[in-house]
Every structure is written in structure tokens, then in C-alpha cells.
Amino acid sequence: MKFENILAEVDGFGKFQIRTILLMVIPRVTLPFHFLLNNFIAAIPSHHCDISSLDDGDMFRNLSQAKRAIVSIPVQEDGTQSSCQMFAEPQYHLLLNSTNITELPTVPCRNGWVYDNSTFKSTLASDWDLVCDNRRVNRAITTIFFMGVMLGAAVFGYLSDRFGRRTMLLVSYIATTFFGFASAFSHHFAMFAVMRFCTGVGLSGISIITIVLCIEWVDIKHRTAVGVLISLDWSFGTAMLPVIAYFVKDWRYLTATVTTPLFLAMVTWWWLPESARWLISNGNVQRAHFYLSKCAQMNGREQFMADFKPEVLSKVILVENDKRKYSYLDLFRTPRMRRVALLTGVVWFGVTCSYYGISFNITGFGVNIYLTQFIYGASEVPAKVFIFLTLNKIGRRLNQAGTLFMTSLCILCNMFIPPDNGPFRTAVGALGKMFAEGAFTTIFLYTTELYPTVMRQNGLGYCSFIARFGVSVCPLIMVLEEVWGHLPNTIFTLVAFVGGVSASCLPETNNVRLPETLEDVERTRRRSSSPSEEKAPL
């Protein structure tokens, strides 16, 4: 008897599983809140130099604000006022003739900047003057945050395979809550950067542990449905974030607001089960029997577990040495496992780099920042419906490769749409975001099915580490627009394409039992139409 057979007997998708999934929604909604938070808290509002230092007497003071700007701030070639330069002294003759200003001496802003607070009450840029020469420091916040997520993927991937999913999930709740509020009340930029880095570490645990815990409690038949349903919280959070940001326009209060759901998550943690698969793989059959009994009781299958002895569970998942502790090095020790690890790493890099390449560019399509973010979130729902309808019909591999190829095509097409055609650019960008989200939805489920139970969190942690490295370099890639305007999109197009090619080389996992050990990965697993087919090998 295999674990899938036991899961079928206690009902692999009953009230117990539904409750577990719903309890996961609470912490998971904070993921898009924080991952896309920098679009709002690090936004750079319209600004110009503080010209109070040019006040040379009554003549200047008697001018209106518009006329003071004319005599104090140079105009750029596109007709807008300069954000980073000011005249060395008031140029009153410009009130009569403002056409010839090329020879007038200008200097960098002397007294700081004045910001337009109509869209945002305060942001990192306006609070700490992260504009002009410091603009890149502002963009670096995104990289710093995702470096924390990258480190957290490696740390929590290893620790949750070592100490259990449930325990490390609570640690990630506490860490994210503490550092999330600490970052909201940081007094200077350096402190904020460190706190955001640590927040990213904690959030990574929530991201990778919740999806694995859900999948490991669900039977083969419902894995696709659960994989798609659990990802809907991301789309909901993506669409809700601009609504929250619209009403909470101070970056400190916004950061605190999007962290608060974790207080409720810590309360509901007490009702979460540990993974029975993980417990059996580690020789803890008594606790596995306890959680399986709770599952059977809630799903109305008590009779099966009443006659089922804990000792039998030790034969359900055959592990050569249940005391062995696996590490990331084991991902590369055997041929097939090594191939899977290398290919999934490339695919994850391609998925995240293209997804966030679009997501971070919400001001580049000529439409209101709040509306663009909402459209991006709403566009993800059709993508998930499409993935739900096709994952079982055409398989994981074709879905993964196809969505990446289409994302690459949309980014490429957007490069040739004129900048003044904002609505059309937004539409194509939203279409690309839709395909990118389809790729993201597929890759989480696909990855959990490719890696064995004894190393599933290590595998997902490794993939998430590679993925967050991809996200970390996204802001740096976007800076390359200073070299050539289309260079960032060209890179994102190529990365998505290479990811699609790599996905085409992975094995299909549709309707195949989850591998439990490294030996299961190294031998060919046949498809199973029913979990009760005991003759089908793992």
C-alpha cells in the first residue's frame, strides 16, 4: 500500500483539505502585498528643486508660484521643468522671453526638493530624497528585498525538510510580522533596507511552505485544482493592493497595513496539520497516524483509521535510512535529479524575471498607477482559469513552455508600440502579464510534483532561490534603459524564451504519483488513472 492509497481511503479532498487551504489563504495574501509593495512605497512623485535659496528680496516674493518656477527652474527639451537642476540665480528676463535658455548657468538642487503630494502623501523617495543622483539607491530597495527572499528560500527550504513544514511556517509568520512592522517605523534608509531584507527572508518561508503543505495533503485527482486555487490568493492580493494603496497613501502606514493579516495567521496556525508524508519519511509514524486520523474524522472516514495500525505506515514510504538528513547537494548527486534541478532552475529564473519585468513597469504604459496595477491583478484570473482547464488535458510541460513563449512574444510586441499609445501598450502588457501568471501558476505545481518528498522543500527552496535572484536583477536590468531604451525588454524577451525551451525538456508529471524518495526520481514512473492502483510503481 502506498501513501496515495491511504489518502484515497481518508478522502484526499474533503473538509480537512479545504479547511487547510482556506487557512493558508490568510498568510499567502500578504505575499503579493509585499512583493509588489515597492511599486507604491518606492514610487518617485513629480518633483523639482527647492528654490527658496534664490529668494533675493521683494521682487522674488511678489511673484506667483508659477512665475517663480519660470525664473528659477530650467525647461527640458520635452517642455517639462527639470527635476534635478536649477538656475544659479533668478533669471527675471525669462518672464518676458523664455525661448533662449541654453546658455544660462544651472546648478544641482541646493536645498533639496519639493514633491507633488497629490498621488502619494509620502514615499521613500520623498522622505529621504532618493531622486536624481540617488535614484538608483531607491531602485536598489527592490533588489535588497528580493535578495532577502532569495536567502529565505534556501534557509526555509532546508529547515522545513529538517524540522517540519508546520514548525517553520510559524517561524516565518513571526519573522515577517516583526520585521514588517520594524521596516514601517524605520528612522533612516539603512535601517529600512536591513528590515526589508529580513522581511523578505520571512516571506519566502510562507511562499514555499504553504504550497507544499497543501499539495502533500491532496490526492492525485485534485492536485491540479488545488494548485490553481491556492494561487488565486495571489491574484486577489495583486488586485487589492492598489485599492489599499489608494486609501493609505503614506508609505509607513501602507507597509504596516499589508503586514497585519499575519496576526490572524498566527492564530489560525494552531489548526494547521503537519505533512503526514514528511512525518512518515522521517520515521515519525505515530504523529502521522494522529494527523491522518484527524483527516479521516473530519472527512467522515473514521472506520478506516480505527482499524489501521501506526506501524503499517512505516512500510508506506520506503526510505533506505529514515535518519538521513538531506541537503541541497543531494539535488546534484544523481543523473536524473541533477537534470531536473538544472532545468527547473532555468525555468524558474525565466518565469520570475519576465513576470516581475512586467510587474515593476506599471508606470511605463501611460495609465494611472493604481488602475494599471488593478488591471494587472484582474488579468491574472483568466490565466488561472485557462491553466485550470488545460493542465490535465495537455499536461504540465506544454502549459509551462507555451505560457513562457507567449510571454516572450508579448514583451517583444510591446517594444514596437509607440509610447504615446498608452491604452494599447497597457493592453498588450496585461496580456503578457496574464501569460506570465499562467507560467507562475504552473511552475509551483509542476515543481512540487517533480521533487521527492524527502527533498521537496529543498527542491522548492533551491528553485525559489534561483527565482528570487532573477527578481533581484530585474531592477538592475531596467536601469539599462539608460544605455538603450529597448534593452531591458530585449533581455526579458530572451530570458522568457530560454525558460520555455528548458521547460520543454522536463518530464511530464500529469496524473503521476508524487515521488517519495530519490530512487523514485531515478526510475521511470508510470501514469496512474487511480490512486488505488497498487500495481503502478511510484
Image (cartoon, grey):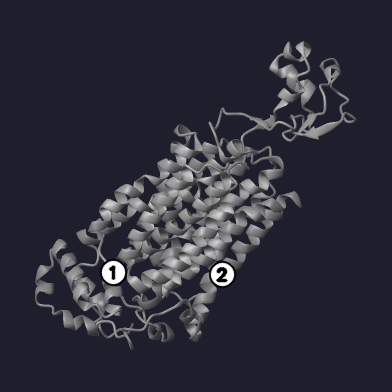
Neighbor class of circle 1 (other Cα within 10 Å; few <14, some 14-19, many 20+) is many
Count of numbered marks: 2
Callout 1: helix, strand or loop? loop
Single out the mark in the foreground, 1 or 2: 1
Query: Gap between marks 1 and 2, in whole Å?
Result: 28 Å
Looking at the rendered structure, which numbered label has been put on residue 346? 2
Q: Position of residue 283 (x, y in %)?
A: 26, 80
| Residue assigned mark 1 | 275
**Few, some or many C-alpha atoms within 10 Å of disc 2 (few <14, some 14-19, many ≥20)?**
many
Question: The disc labelled 1 sits on which kind of residue?
Answer: Ser
* Percent position of residue 141, x then y: 58, 50
**Amino acid at the residue labelled 2:** Val
Pick out the residue farthest to the bottom: 320
Question: Residue 296: horizontal and vertical position, in percent?
Answer: 16, 67
Q: Is residue 109 above or below residue 286?
A: above
SS class, disc 2? helix
- Give the quarter of the figure containing the N terminus: bottom left
For the residue pair 189 and 8, the one nearer the viewer reads as 189
In the depicted structure, whether residue 344 falls above or below residue 248: below
- With respect to residue 201, does 382 lie above or below? above
Of residues 217 and 182, which is closer to you in this image?
182
List x then y, in percent, for residue 9. 18, 72
- Does residue 240 appear left or right of residue 429 in this picture? left
Upstream in sequence: badge 1 or badge 2: 1
Q: Is residue 530 visible?
A: no
Q: Which residue appears at 56% of the width and 64% of the height? A: 349
Residue at 13% across, 73% down: 305
Q: Residue at x 67, y 31 (%)?
A: 113
> In the picture, residue 466 is in which quadrant?
bottom right
Q: Is residue 105 left or right of residue 219?
A: right
| Rendered-image quadrant of the C terminus | bottom left
For the point 78% across and 12% down, the residue is: 59
